[in-house]
Amino acid sequence: MTSLQTDYMAESAAPIDTLEYYFRSHDWQFERDGDDEIVATVKGSWSDYELRGLWRADDQVLQFIAMTGISAAATPAGQERSSLYELLGMVNEQLWVGHFELWSSDGAVLFRHALLLDGGDDSGLSLPQAHAMVDAAIEECERYYPAIQFVLWGGKSPRDALAAALTETEGEA
């Protein structure tokens, strides 16, 4: 058991409570809106990510969103948008958990996924589940952020942008 788990003894708690504990344990700034929503800010390599947990008790679903800070709203709605949709489709084919999307209302590019926590009246989110969910969101944002930027601002084709972003380097510069 990790020290994080030792400090947090609840097997599984209310989802937003668990996320609050997780965010607090990492010293991340967060705001909570009742029992149904929490928002944290995390500094990544490419951007500050806004992590948002939304609990829908009626459906027992926790939706988790990572806002990348990338907006396609400032780009022309033509070729760049079309290329971005193509890139996101290619990226999503590779993901096992969650997906990237472009919100039509404001052009925000985000990573989203949901957990069905249907365990009866005591449904909750365990700390290992929270850790896996948050880590997956941040890792995918970090991995694909450059590809999205290459398409929107670098004029690369989706295939070239994806290849360039996923190139593995050895050592450090």
Image (tube, rainbow, N blue to C red):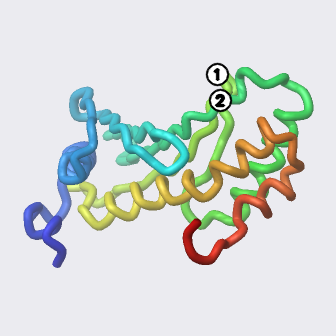
Q: Residue at x 58, y 40 (%)?
A: 110
Q: Residue at x 77, y 60 (%)?
A: 164
Q: Amino acid at mark 1?
A: Asp
Rounded to the nearest whole Å, what is the CA distance between mark 2 and mark 1? 8 Å
Whether residue 14 can be seen here: no
66 horizontally vs 87: left or right: left
Residue 156 at x, y percent in the picture: 86, 47
Q: Amino acid at mark 2?
A: Ser
Image quadrant occupied by the N terminus? bottom left
| Nearest the eye: 15 or 141 | 141
Tags 2 and 1 touching, CB below 8 Å: yes
Tell me the tag on residue 106: 1
First in sequence: mark 2 vs mark 1? 2
Q: Which of labels 2 and 1 is toward the front?
A: 2
Q: Taking 84 as reference, is 125 above or below it?
A: below
Tell me the tag on residue 71: 2
